[in-house]
């Protein structure tokens, strides 16, 4: 039944396009008082740079088999149903509005001026420092992390302070914290990990990446000139390349860099050079994720900003005004703009990537359902293609 003030209505709307779905069905309810001559969907997959028009059709016997309905179509409530299909193919998103041609002119349902938008699942990336087996109730906290990854359907997880027992330098795979988390997930995730140095006098400490997507390639390497496994400033980074459905191939790095006094600037320059060497035109994005040990807005962070290559995506998603001031308007007061921020963990993305940050949130805080699992919080950012 239609309200008398809304005689044209998009019904059965689903804002999500499923994996493999190439057609978006449209059902439109039209008040018979409009005396509709034609109903059409005006749609785009490229932000209206091009527009297509698809007709909808009135099927008189629509409800006979589907609902076992005697009223059929049109029904006794002065409403007729029209059906159509948008052929979205492999597009990430489709935006549309519905037009009804009547003797008195065109009536529109454009979702109150915002249009209707259906899209694929976004790419979800989480970065989290695990605190190297230093947590009370450590085993339970590994389970909390796995539950969050499952519940939130996170695609790629970058971990730092991944630890396993030292084992006289040979390690102990069964105690590897990234492997334990991976094995507690409900679905299969791929794991790539490597270690840098002795942590807390008893662990091989390193970094890792978990991914729902198959690895196209993996790599690992030192970004520090120091390769001494007994030095805390010996730092290694891991890289994976994955093909994200409907978005393209991306490179993801998981990094744990030293403080400014321990070699951050050298390490970041080496990481940046490595990432740039790997970032060709065939890539949709390159991400530098992890614990960078630089406070937002301060000297090390400003060095990242000055490269004009890698940008803070959690900031882009959660405070666009500040992001624009820092990364697009070259504000001379970066420290003041970010004085209350306090982060040292980031997801940086190559500026010329074809993705954008759509949302960002903190995880594993005192205020969410998963609770604290580390001395760091996690940062989750969702990405989608630019129009």
Image (cartoon, rainbow, N blue to C red):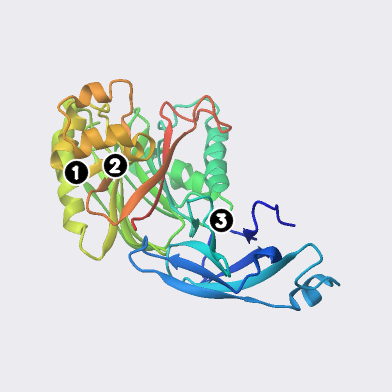
Taking 115 as reference, is 315 left or right? left
Q: Name the residue that disc number 1 marks.
A: 223
| First in residue order: circle 2 vs circle 3 | 3
| First in residue order: circle 1 vs circle 3 | 3
Q: Residues within 10 Å of mark 2 (few under 14, many from 20)?
A: many
Q: Secondary structure at mark 2?
A: strand
| First in residue order: circle 1 vs circle 2 | 1
Q: Secondary structure at mark 1?
A: loop
Residue in the foreground of this view, choosing between 108 and 331: 108
Q: Secondary structure at mark 3?
A: loop
Residue 198 visible (yes or no): no
Q: Nearer the viewer, mark 1 or mark 3?
A: 3
Q: Mark 2 and mark 3: span between their CA atoms?
A: 25 Å
Q: Residues within 10 Å of mark 1 (few under 14, many from 20)?
A: many
Q: Which quadrant holds the N terminus?
A: bottom right
Marks 1,2: beta carbons within 8 A? yes
Q: Mark 1 and mark 2: span between their CA atoms?
A: 9 Å
Q: Mark on residue 187? A: 3
Looking at the image, is 316 positioned above or below residue 69?
above
Q: Mark on residue 211? A: none
Question: Which residue is at a point 57% across and 42% down the rendered structure image?
Answer: 147
Question: Which residue is at a point 50% across and 28% down the rendered structure image?
Answer: 372
Taking 64 as reference, is 10 left or right? left
Q: Name the residue that disc number 2 marks.
A: 255
Residue in the foreground of this view, choosing between 269 and 250: 250
Q: Which quadrant holds the C terminus?
A: bottom left
**Image location of residue 305, percent across then percent down:** 18, 37
**Image location of residue 240, percent across then percent down:** 33, 56
């Amino acid at each position: 039944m239609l309200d008398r003030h809304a005689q044209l209505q998009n019904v059965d709307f689903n804002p999500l396009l499923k994996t493999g779905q190439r057609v978006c069905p449209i059902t439109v309810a039209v008040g018979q008082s409009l005396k509709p001559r034609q109903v059409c969907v005006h749609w785009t997959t490229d932000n209206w740079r091009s527009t297509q028009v698809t007709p909808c059709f009135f099927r008189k016997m629509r409800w006979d088999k589907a609902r076992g309905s005697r009223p059929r179509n049109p029904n006794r409530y002065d409403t007729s149903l029209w059906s159509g299909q948008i052929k979205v193919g492999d597009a990430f998103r489709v935006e549309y509005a519905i037009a009804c041609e009547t003797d008195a002119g065109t009536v529109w349902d454009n979702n109150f001026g915002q249009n209707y938008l259906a899209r694929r699942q976004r790419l979800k990336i989480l970065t989290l420092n695990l605190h190297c087996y230093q947590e009370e109730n450590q085993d339970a906290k590994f389970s909390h992390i796995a539950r969050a990854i499952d519940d939130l359907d996170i695609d790629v997880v970058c971990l730092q302070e991944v630890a396993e027992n030292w084992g006289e330098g040979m390690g102990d795979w069964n105690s590897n914290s990234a492997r334990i988390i991976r094995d507690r997930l409900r679905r299969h995730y791929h794991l790539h990990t490597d270690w840098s140095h002795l942590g807390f006098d008893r662990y091989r400490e390193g970094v890792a990446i978990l991914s729902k997507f198959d690895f196209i390639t993996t790599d690992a390497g030192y970004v520090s000139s120091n390769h001494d496994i007994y030095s805390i400033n010996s730092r290694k980074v891991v890289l994976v390349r994955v093909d994200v459905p409907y978005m393209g191939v991306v490179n993801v790095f998981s990094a744990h860099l030293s403080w400014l006094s321990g070699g951050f600037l050298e390490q970041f320059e080496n990481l940046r050079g490595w990432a740039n060497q790997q970032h060709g035109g065939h890539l949709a994005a390159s991400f530098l994720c992890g614990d960078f040990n630089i406070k937002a807005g301060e000297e090390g962070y400003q060095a990242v900003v000055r490269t004009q290559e890698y940008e803070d995506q959690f900031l882009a998603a959660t405070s666009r005004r500040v992001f624009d001031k820092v990364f697009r308007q070259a504000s001379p007061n970066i420290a003041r703009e970010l004085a209350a921020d306090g982060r040292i963990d980031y997801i940086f993305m190559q500026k010329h990537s074809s993705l954008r940050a759509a949302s960002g949130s903190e995880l594993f805080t005192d205020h969410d359902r998963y609770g604290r699992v580390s001395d760091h919080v996690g940062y989750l950012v969702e990405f989608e293609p630019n129009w």
